[in-house]
Image (cartoon, grey):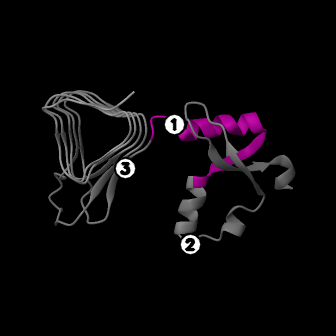
């Protein structure tokens, strides 16, 4: 399916549109916006600011994503908004950008990864399962990963229901727990 952009939609120069997007009448896409593949913006939907939408998001009429925060502590800069895959925003929903320069308002994918990892714990017969995101966050915070992951085995990328791509996981199994 090719992209379908209504002639009254406003797409600012600099906006990046994924493949097969649908943008309705009088919708607005700002210059620093990145829309993922197969996003749908119904008529009068707005995405602005330093904002990225994941794949297959849908914005109903009069939704505003990435607008400047209403927080009175805002002092300028370039805060932004990051939205994961397959999120749906119904009519008149607003998601504002973060307050501080370099920070982001973040909404994850619609697929609840924690729930899926809990299911993997049972499916793999593991005592615990952690995702690549947890390991990356620990690494970023300077954690001792050798100590933190002691007893965990890297199981590589595992299929997760509801996601096109799998998730790299580490599992604490009975035999690795020792």
Magenta residues (range) = 109-132
Q: Residue at x 16, y 28 (%)?
A: 25
Residue at the disc numbered 1: 112
Which of pointers 2 and 1 lies earlier in the amino acid sequence? 1
Q: Residue at x 17, y 34 (%)?
A: 27
Taking depth in this image into account, of 142 and 20 the one nearest to the observer is 20
Q: Secondary structure at mark 2?
A: loop
Residue at the disc numbered 3: 106
> Quick check: 76 above or below 9?
below
Residues packed near mark 2 inside 10 Å, few (<14), some (14 to 19) or many (20 plus): few
**Which quadrant: the C terminus?**
bottom right
Which of pointers 3 and 2 lies earlier in the amino acid sequence? 3
Residue at the disc numbered 2: 142
Q: Secondary structure at mark 3?
A: strand
Taking depth in this image into account, of 103 and 61 the one nearest to the observer is 61
Taking depth in this image into account, of 168 and 6 the one nearest to the observer is 6
Q: How many marks?
A: 3
Residue 19 lies in what quarter of the image?
A: top left
């Amino acid at each position: 399916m090719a992209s379908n952009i209504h002639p009254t939609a406003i797409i600012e120069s600099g906006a990046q549109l994924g493949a097969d997007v649908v943008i309705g009448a009088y919708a607005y896409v700002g210059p620093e916006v990145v829309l993922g593949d197969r996003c749908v913006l119904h008529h009068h939907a707005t995405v602005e600011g330093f904002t990225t939408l994941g794949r297959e998001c849908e914005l109903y009429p009069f939704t505003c994503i990435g607008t400047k925060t209403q927080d009175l502590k805002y002092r300028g800069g370039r805060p932004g908004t990051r939205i994961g895959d397959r999120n749906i925003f119904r009519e008149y929903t607003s998601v504002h950008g973060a307050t501080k320069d370099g920070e982001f308002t973040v909404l994850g994918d619609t697929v609840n990864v924690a729930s899926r990892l809990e299911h993997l714990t049972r499916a793999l017969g593991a005592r615990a399962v952690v995702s690549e995101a947890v390991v990356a966050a620990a690494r970023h915070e300077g954690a001792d990963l050798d100590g933190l992951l002691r007893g965990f085995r890297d199981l590589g990328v595992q299929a997760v229901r509801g996601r096109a791509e799998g998730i790299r996981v580490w599992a604490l199994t009975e035999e690795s727990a020792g």
